[in-house]
Image (cartoon, rainbow, N blue to C red):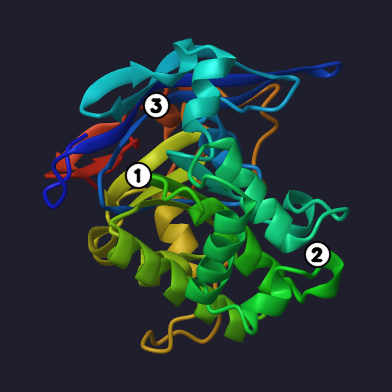
Amino acid sequence: MSSPQFREPLIEVKDLYVYFYTYAGVVKAIEDMTFTIYKGEKFCMVGETGCGKSVTSRALANIVPSPGRIVKGKVIYYRDGKPVNILELSEEQLREIRGKEIAYIVQDPSSALDPLYTIGYQIVETMIDHYTVRDQKEGYKRAVELLREVLMPDPEQRIKNYPHELSGGQRQRAVISIGLSNMPRLLIADEPTSSLDVTVQAQLLELLRRLVREHGLTLFLITHDMGVVAEMCDRVAVLYAGNIVELAPVDEIFKNPKHPYTMGLLRAVPNPQADIEKLEPIPGTIPNLIYPPPGCRFHPRCPFARDVCKREKPPLVEVSPGHYVRCWLHAE
């Protein structure tokens, strides 16, 4: 899936399937997932809670939690220009990539930080594990620089603090510092601002934008907020019930959405320029992925659904350069 702006692929996901084997049945969390993230771009994945965004992001580093299992597909990572299938690497080989070349910022910083160790120790430990620094003295000096770069107040003191001594925004800055400590090529941010207030959220989004620009990082941002998508992204994949239903440059998504689910997401977002009296929620809920509906997974909630939508699953097709949609009725 080509991008007119970005040419060099960094990650290619091909025909990915991820299932969770539970006592209640097999949860078909991700099916028929194919997309490419290009070097230097800010790529977003958006959708409601439970659509499979976090599972997809974890599959990129082959860290899908139990009882999940990647049952099919490839995750091709271009390392020094050579394609490597991450799903075929040993744990030892994966440790060389995770945290160093592919870093992960989680939604809840409290779950990512160890309460028994100081912030400085956790940043330094990450760098020593990947041989980014020679010793702890060099590591602590670099840790202060990292905290200063993410605009942490009084970084010399903060490296001595434990996680519970920091505010939510400061903890998230500490997690970003850990993610950046080894200067990764790909930074995966899984809803990094969803638990923060609006002011801190805006600061951290601007911080991520600046870090991508200054360090030449590639950003894979997971969010459910279309406002964040509009502000941050170059391209966006709209995810519904484990399937990509639309993928396009961000301007194209907002100006010319083709899938009814994308249209529904946009109608549910406040827009001061739109002449509407109230927001329109999407009726219904995401289907049970143990027993997903036949055909298009969105058809039970779609106001335009026809018989073919209920019988046959639509393919993801390119309707214009760089714009893909999974819908039988996209031409209408």
Q: Are marks 2 and 1 in contact (CB under 8 Å)?
A: no
- What residue sits right under mark 1 in the picture? 246
Image location (x, y in percent) of residue 100 = 48, 39
- What residue sits right under mark 2 in the picture? 163
Q: CA distance from mark 3 to mark 2?
A: 53 Å
Q: Nearer the viewer, residue 237 or 149?
A: 149
- Using the rendered image of the protein, determine whether residue 49 is visible from the camera's viewpoint: no
The amino acid type found where label 2 is placed reads Pro
Residue occupying the point 72% across, 55% down? 121
Q: Measured along the vertical axis of the image, is residue 147 above or below residue 332?
A: below
Which label lies toward us, 1 or 3? Answer: 1
Q: Measured along the vertical axis of the image, is residue 72 above or below residue 308?
A: above
Q: Nearer the viewer, residue 314 or 21?
A: 21
**Figure label count:** 3
Image location (x, y in percent) of residue 327 = 34, 37
Residue 329, quarter of picture: top left
Q: Measured along the vertical axis of the image, is residue 28 above or below residue 58?
A: above
**In the image: residue 79, left or right of residue 56:** left
